[in-house]
Image (tube, coloured by chain):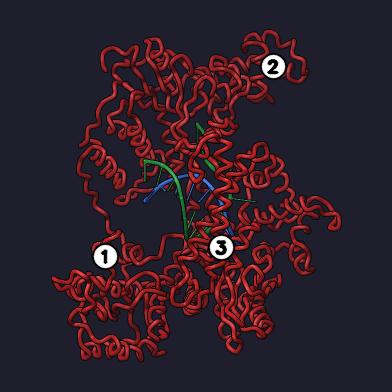
Chain colours: A red, B blue, C green
Amino acid sequence: MSGTFGKGHHLHLIDGSAFIFRAYHALPPLTRKSDGLPIGAVAGFCNMLHRYVEGNTGPDAPTHAAVIFDKGSHTFRNEMYDLYKANREAMPEDLRPQIPLTRTATEAFNIACKEKEGYEADDIIATLAVQARAAGGRCTIISSDKDLMQLVGDGVEMLDAMKNRTIDREGVFEKFGVYPERVVDVQALAGDSVDNVPGAPGIGIKTAALLINEYGDLDALLKRAEEIKQPKRRQTLIDHADQIRLSRKLVLLDENTPLDFTLDDLEVREPDADKLLGFLADMEFRTLSKRVAEVLGKEAPVIEEPKVVENGGEVAEIPFDQAGYEQISDAKTLQAWIDRIYEFGYVAVDTETTGLDEMVADLVGISLCVEPGKACYIPLLHKSHSADDLFGSDDLAEGQIQTEEALRMLTPMLTDPSIIKIGQNMKYDSKIFAQVGIAVAPIDDTMLMSYAMHAGLHGHGMDTLSERYLGHTPIPIKPLLGSGKSAITFDKVPLADAVPYAAEDADITLRLWQLFKPQLHRVQVTKVYETLERPLVPVLAAMERSGIKVDRDTLSRMSNAFAQKMAGLEDEIYEMVGRKFNVGSPAQVGEVLFEDMGLEGGKKGANGKYSTGATILEDLATEHDFPKRILDWRQLSKLKSTYTDALQEHINKDTGRVHTSYSIAGASTGRLASTDPNLQNIPIRSEEGRRIREAFVAEEDKVLVALDYSQIELRILAHIANIPALKQAFKDGLDIHAMTASEMFDVPLDEMTPDVRRQAKAINFGVIYGISGFGLARNLRIPRAEAQGFIDRYFERFPGIRTYMDDTKAFAKEHGYVQTLFGRKINTPEIAAKGPRAGFAQRAAINAPIQGTAADVIRRAMIRMPDAIKDIPATMLLQVHDELLFEVEKGAEDDLIKAARDVMENAADPVVKLDVKLTVDAGIGSNWAEAH
DNA sequence: GACATCACG
DNA sequence: GACGTACGTGATGTCC
């Protein structure tokens, strides 16, 4: 559509400065890799523009568009009032150089880019919006600036691009309590601390709207100010009438800004692909370049990756070359390798297997490396690939040493105390070796070295480490194995492919080890690595191999019962709604709730879908039965799919037991994580769920014993933050939440009610998490001000907490990490971020030393446990953060509890002398529900 | 594969 | 010029 702007045309006006500030605060301080130019705001700005352009499809797409910027800090408003915007903070140093680049970016996207000296963007927007309206067209202002709300109505609306929410007359009314034409009146009264618009002292938006609605408009109100009933309000308006009138002039937008262009100059244009991609390449925006190129149907520009390898140039730059990798096919060559390993005293080892589950996977081959660039692969059980092999014959490929012979030769070296076996995630390889009867020791683990140094910075998988610290991308496994249904196992990979892949893994592992070993000292985490990480490997390997007996019949019966109950609930639900729908689809539940049934509660989330989380449904459940049914159904569905059904699939065919896998380097705080299946989140809080634990049983003539630390994190908090009252309470064996409640609310302990105690408990936990008034309010479902009152009171009673929080934040800011009592470092790179991310990072920094110290304590206990219980017929099976679960021969329960409790309660000694005793509760039973 | 939801400490 | 808000995890189902 072209011609003179008028009816049927649609103008978009983007508030450029708002985009810039949003972009700046939303992203960490990024810099251009090649020269360090600050670039974060430009990156965010371009992303927003791109997303904006992409979103502009369909019948409502704009015909005309422009991005409008502020120009100069001095405007006509300063002539009226020299303090206008005087309390604005200066523009951040790293933002200033980015401002001109945002203009260039806008032009690169081929969107009109307008500004005018002496005027604010808002005035230009007002002028254009009014022109568009006068011409009979429509105008959408893309901004959420409340100052622009005065323009809304009669063909002009606003769009909050971040929330994807349009603001029409009603939206303005929601915000200001008046319709757009009276917005300036309300603003004139309420003032604006951000722009330093004075307004009337003591009058906010609510009162202002009240007054304007009562008297009609500002002039009438000021004229009839004498009539106002409240004496204080009356006097304020009389005394400050001039100031209020000035305020109105300040907030009133100039709809007659002289402009040297017309609406027709703003017609939407196709982007110039070369110019746009050129600009993005210049800025070195890799991801965005690719995305934009894809949309434009062009080749993405090549952006040179400056080789910044974070190894400090400490590793000799020996190139990765497959020519240095050899296949070992005979005993003589293998022996030569073993001899060399003895000369060096260490070797990097990697196993290749038929799968990722060590309990099921079979050993296929072994790779070794002692010098960077020189590695070997010993294939053992690779299958042959004859052309007529349609049915997958079991014939072994040529050129492989007999497995038994190779293992017989390797075993002395693998178990020799003088030879360090280096691996990347050694727990995996040692479990594979354990399968064939080889107890690999001693070990080093590059994954755990990285974890000790880099927790919180990045993952610790081999690909990540190799790229980051060696500047080398490892050969990917995908092309070798394929994916989906046609995927093969490693024993089917032809040796020509298998050798370089496998050998390279050992090569990379060795290089990482050579790099990391000296760095551990420099970062001062050698102790952490040697006492908290490395020794845990054999302990966890043993626990995982033990597994826990799970009774299939119990699960199966429960699953059937759940299925029946769910079917019953579904019938009731369909009955209530009058039609069938997928109860498992949150989107459909939302539609039914808020459209079919017409309940109160709004849209949420960027996708425009209704939010139907448990807290929302619980609130609705007080009024209606329907949400309650959904909640019940969801609980059953969760229990059935995740627990009774999935758990059965995890019962090992050979052992009849479930073998989880613990990741040692998964959680940044030092906690373990449990996967495949996760046995750290087996239900317990609900009565129905708790029964799942009845399926976790002891073998005949054995019992399960659970030992768990009592309030370990609060005890650690009491020690770290040095809170005498808390310490004393623990010493006296008090109910800690009741004691907190008593202190805060001045209620004697013997008059404590469950509800007051519950509130104190929420506060105690909140403190550990880096509390905020908002979070506590939401958790307790009380007004925010009340929650803030609780927190203030808590800080007053336990002043050490505030100090701890402030000190921890300051430490994190200064050093970029925080520490546990045992010296574990948790990096906090986001602590320097701007905007809301800073809040996240600060709370995580406050929590990490507490959660991490507790994790260290139980790690120490676990490491000492095997030796402490070696004479007791008991096996350690599971760890659940503050709990250890054992399987014990009947009759030995008391011995086990005594020995294990002793280890756990004294696990901090002798490195850390806690001011607060750790205590451990014990339980015994034939299943996990009874034992807990 | 992203997102929402919910299980645990 | 306005954030979005309690810490740490993993598994499942829906929907694109």
Q: Chain of mark 2?
A: A
Is residue A334 in view from this perspective? yes
Do the CB atoms of the residues marked 2 and 1 lie less than 8 Å apart? no
What element does badge 1 sit on? helix
Q: Earlier in the sequence, mark 3 or mark 1?
A: 1
Q: Earlier in the sequence, mark 3 or mark 2?
A: 2
- Taking the image as shown, residue A750 lies to the left or right of residue A51, namely right
Is label 3 or label 1 in front?
Answer: 3
**Residue bearing the label numbered 1:** A481
**Residue bearing the label numbered 3:** A557
CA separation in Å, label 3 and label 2: 75 Å
Is residue A260 in view from this perspective? no
Image quadrant containing the C terminus of chain A: bottom right
Please provide percent x and percent y for residue A448.
Answer: 44, 71
Q: Quadrant of residue A718?
A: bottom right
Pointers 2 and 1 within a single chain? yes
Are there few (<14), some (14-19), or many (20+) residues within 10 Å of tag 2? Answer: many
Is label 3 or label 2 in front?
Answer: 3
Q: Residue furthest left?
A: A387
Please provide percent x and percent y for residue A786.
Answer: 72, 42
